[in-house]
Amino acid sequence: MTRAKASPLLTTRYGIAAPNASDTPAARALQLYGEWAEQETDLLSGVVTDGHHVLEVGGDHAAHTLWLALAVGDTGAVHVVEPRRLPFQQLCANIALNQLANVHTHHAYLGANDGNEGLASETTRRIRLDSLALPALHLLKVNIPDVLEDLLKGAGATLVEHRPLVYARLGGPASAEREVDAVKAWAIGSGRTHPPCSTQITTRGSPATCFRACSAATSLRRTPRAAWTSTR
């Protein structure tokens, strides 16, 4: 009897994903537990709904993109901007595997102006968030630390027109305060949360021990003229 060949694909909480050799926390969590930073989706599930438009900065192998695509439904849209070449390719692969027609991917770095941005040994296209000309934006989710300050410099028109909720993973202590101040220039109120990177019992039924000490400092804020609440 011929034994069935095991599928090379990963089964995650919100869909399937292609395995990759990356050692980033997101990639390792998907391979070990089938999920990544699930408390972030729990928090954002209270503000993302059918028909919403979301912009994600940093693909994280589509770990949260899969959930966002389900949350906004067929009438909504998810845009994902990923500046790094290989993570962008991995992102696109997982979007294609799950046949997500409401997800749009962009290989670019979001900065203060248009041009080129050097990243490690590569150069990628730098564009302003405003140049995307999004028809609507309800949530701006920034997954890459240390890019928020530069990103906001090229996002003024979008922030004023659409007043999205901003959820960002902040950088280190030195840059975090600058990033918070940059958002305060647009926002009413402020707040931070430290969600753990995986649930205590994961989607595969196993306890999450690998990332128990891992947390991401985040900022959750609403841009002008909209009230919001947050917890620390």
Image: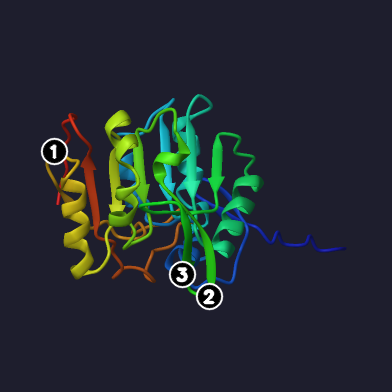
Rate crowding at label 3 as few (under 14), some (14 to 19) or many (20 or more) other CA atoms within 10 Å: few
Closer-to-camera residue (146/34)? 146
Image position, residue 14 (x, y; %) = 51, 45
State which tag comes first along the sequence, 2 or 1.
2
Image position, residue 41 (x, y; %) = 36, 45
Query: Is label 2 or label 1 in front?
Result: 2
Residue position for label 1: 188
Q: Residue at x 50, y 64 (%)?
A: 27
> Does residue 186 sit above or below 76 in this rendering?
below
State which tag comes first along the sequence, 3 or 1.
3
The amino acid at mark 2 is Ser
Query: Is label 3 or label 1 in front?
Result: 1
| Label of residue 121 in the image | 2
> Does residue 177 sit above or below 227 in this rendering?
below
* Location of residue 17 by image quarter: bottom right
Rate crowding at label 1 as few (under 14), some (14 to 19) or many (20 or more) other CA atoms within 10 Å: some
- Compute the Cα span from label 3 to label 1: 34 Å
The amino acid at mark 1 is Ile
Under circle 3, the secondary element is loop
- Compute the Cα span from label 3 to label 2: 18 Å
**Residue 7 located left or right of residue 103:** right
Under circle 1, the secondary element is loop
Residue position for label 3: 24
Image position, residue 146 (x, y; %) = 31, 63
Q: Residue at x 53, y 66 (%)?
A: 123
